[in-house]
Amino acid sequence: MRCIIMANGEYGDIEVYRELFHGHEIVLCADGGANYAYKLGLVPDSIVGDMDSILPEVREYFQARNVKMHKYPLRKDFTDTQLVLEIAKQWKPTEIMMLGTLGGRLDHTLSNLYCGMEMVQKGIKLTHCTPNLRVHIIDRDIDITGQTGDIVSVLALSQQARGVSETGFEYILDNAVLEKNNPYAVSNKLAANKGRISVQEGILAVFHYFQGMPETPQI
């Protein structure tokens, strides 16, 4: 089951995301992410957070449609994104797609990247999406499909990532060790339309920048 989480970050052209929703996925909103669901005409399954960012008219609209609200205190130990990921576990998803989690405040972006690590360790596919960037959080392998010359960077989210290999890129890695304090595996490029990245131990963030803006976010 696919779960789409809508956070309250940057989206760009909101209409670009419409094709992601097919009506059979779970849609969860982290607080002000509900404002973007409203703009797209979506009714989420739940809205989670301290409710300091959701617009009053949007909240009233979804309350009238019996959308479940998980309200937390403004002063709390977890971000709204962390809280919505906890709620997502109840649905037992096999894949989580996160929107509005990149851009804007750098601290929020980094927090959003790190807080998905637990889900990946549970075997759940997790991707952060914008119109021209995907960030895949992985602990095994992934095929990257795009255009020759697409920029792909790899960073270790765990202290170390061992057995990292990259094939189908300008610069090949073979059983390398990546460390947080030596982030050298950036700005690689696809040598063809597809490349493969794998890691034997640890967690990676794989940044795939598309050349130009695709018509719809690609998975």
Image (cartoon, rainbow, N blue to C red):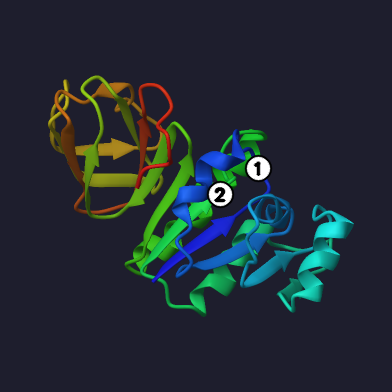
Residue 138, position as x, y percentages in the image: 32, 52
Q: Answer yes or no: do the residues labelled 2 and 1 have beta carbons within 8 Å?
A: yes
In the rendered view, does 81 fall on the left or right side of 174?
Answer: right
Q: Residue at x 48, y 35 (%)?
A: 131
Residue 91 is situated, as x and y percent measured from the top left of the image, at 48, 78
Q: Which residue is mark 2?
A: 112
Q: Quadrant of the N terminus?
A: bottom left
| Local SS, label 1 | loop
| Residue 121, quarter of picture | bottom left
- Left-right relation of 48 to 204: right
Q: How many marks?
A: 2
Residue 86 falls in which quadrant of the image? bottom right
Left or right: 109 in relation to 23: right
Q: Amino acid at mark 2?
A: Asn
Q: Residues within 10 Å of mark 2 (few under 14, many from 20)?
A: many
Q: CA distance from mark 2 to mark 1?
A: 10 Å
Identify the residue position indicated by label 1 in the image. Answer: 9
In terms of secondary structure, where does tag 2 sit? helix
The x and y percentages for residue 62 are: 76, 68
Image vertical order of residue 153 relative to residue 200, above or below: above
Specify the amino acid type for callout 1. Answer: Gly
Q: Residues within 10 Å of mark 1 (few under 14, many from 20)?
A: some
In this rendering, position of residue 52 left or right of residue 175:
right
Give the mark, 2 or 1, whose residue is nearer the N terminus: 1
